[in-house]
Image (cartoon, rainbow, N blue to C red):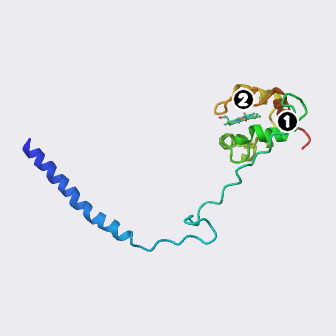
């Protein structure tokens, strides 16, 4: 028992001794000259990092008018209601990119706006029921009239 305790104490002492030079090295490192803040950018911002993020608001404004009425702009509705996940950089786009690549299809097809293989019934079903990582959208999120306009725009044939 006593012998074990002594051994433990010795081990602790050895660890402490081994750490001392490391601590000393840290101390001298902090005396190194500090990097200068880049000119023109915010003070202290690192240089050479990734490009600046796109503007925060990428989605279109919600088009005006009665949300229960037909005939509103499907492209703007898609951007506003679905765009947080389905525009460039959205998590829907990111996940579908992976699926497209796995299926040997062009990654550009991850943007629903580029797809030509969707049909309105499928779109309505995915939106109302959800699919895997996509949460279902209620009729408060997207009214039936809005969903019809979005589905019509996503399946447009004039392109
Ligand atoms: C909260 C994020 C989110 C929102 C909002 C969202 N989606 Fe999605 N959507 C996803 C994700 C994530 C997937 C991929 C699901 C998976 O396979 O894991 C997806 C998949 C889909 C698919 C299936 C595509 C395929 O290849 O099968 C359709 C269609 C779709 N969404 C339509 C819409 C429409 C239309 C809207 C707007 C009314 C919308 N989504 C809003 C996240 C979202």
- In percent of width and height, residue 30 lies at 39, 69
- In percent of width and height, residue 48 lies at 59, 66
- In percent of width and height, residue 148 lies at 84, 30
97 displayed left or right of 44:
right
Q: Please, is residue 72 above or below residue 129 in the view?
A: below
Q: Mark 2 points at which residue?
A: 137
As drawn, the residue found furthest toward the left would be: 2
Q: In which quarter of the image is ligand 1?
A: top right
Q: Please, is residue 64 above or below residue 30 in the view?
A: above
Q: Please, is residue 23 above or below residue 140 in the view?
A: below
48 displayed left or right of 25:
right
- In percent of width and height, residue 78 lies at 80, 38
Classify mark 1: residues with Cα within 10 Å, few (<14), some (14-19) or many (20+): some
Could you say which quadrant of the image residue 92 lies in? Answer: top right
Lower sequence index among marks 1 and 2: 2
Q: Is mark 2 on a helix, strand or loop?
A: loop
- Residue at (88, 29) in percent of width and height: 69
Question: Does mark 2's beta carbon lie closer than 8 Å to ligand 1?
Answer: yes
Classify mark 2: residues with Cα within 10 Å, few (<14), some (14-19) or many (20+): some
- Residue at (70, 54) in percent of width and height: 54
- Residue at (62, 67) in percent of width and height: 41
Give the distance between the C-alpha atoms of the residues marked 1 and 2, in whole angstroms.
Answer: 19 Å
Of residue 27 and residue 119, the one placed in the foreground of this image is 27
Q: Name the residue under label 1.
A: 155
- Residue at (85, 27) in percent of width and height: 68
């Amino acid at each position: 028992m006593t012998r074990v305790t002594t051994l433990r104490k010795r081990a602790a002492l050895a660890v402490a001794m081994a750490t001392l030079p490391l601590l000393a090295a840290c101390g001298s490192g902090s005396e190194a000259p500090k990097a200068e803040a880049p000119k023109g950018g915010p003070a202290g911002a690192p240089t050479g990092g990734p490009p600046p993020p796109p503007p925060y608001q990428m989605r279109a404004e919600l088009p005006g008018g009665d949300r229960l009425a037909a005939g509103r702009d499907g492209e703007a509705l898609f951007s506003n209601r679905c765009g947080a996940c389905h525009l460039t950089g959205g998590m829907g786009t990111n996940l579908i990119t992976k699926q497209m690549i796995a299926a040997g299809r062009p990654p550009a097809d991850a943007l629903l706006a580029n797809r030509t293989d969707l049909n309105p019934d499928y779109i309505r079903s995915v939106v109302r029921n959800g699919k895997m990582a996509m949460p279902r959208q209620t009729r408060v999120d997207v009214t039936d009239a809005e969903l019809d306009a979005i589905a019509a725009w996503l399946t447009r044939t004039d392109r």
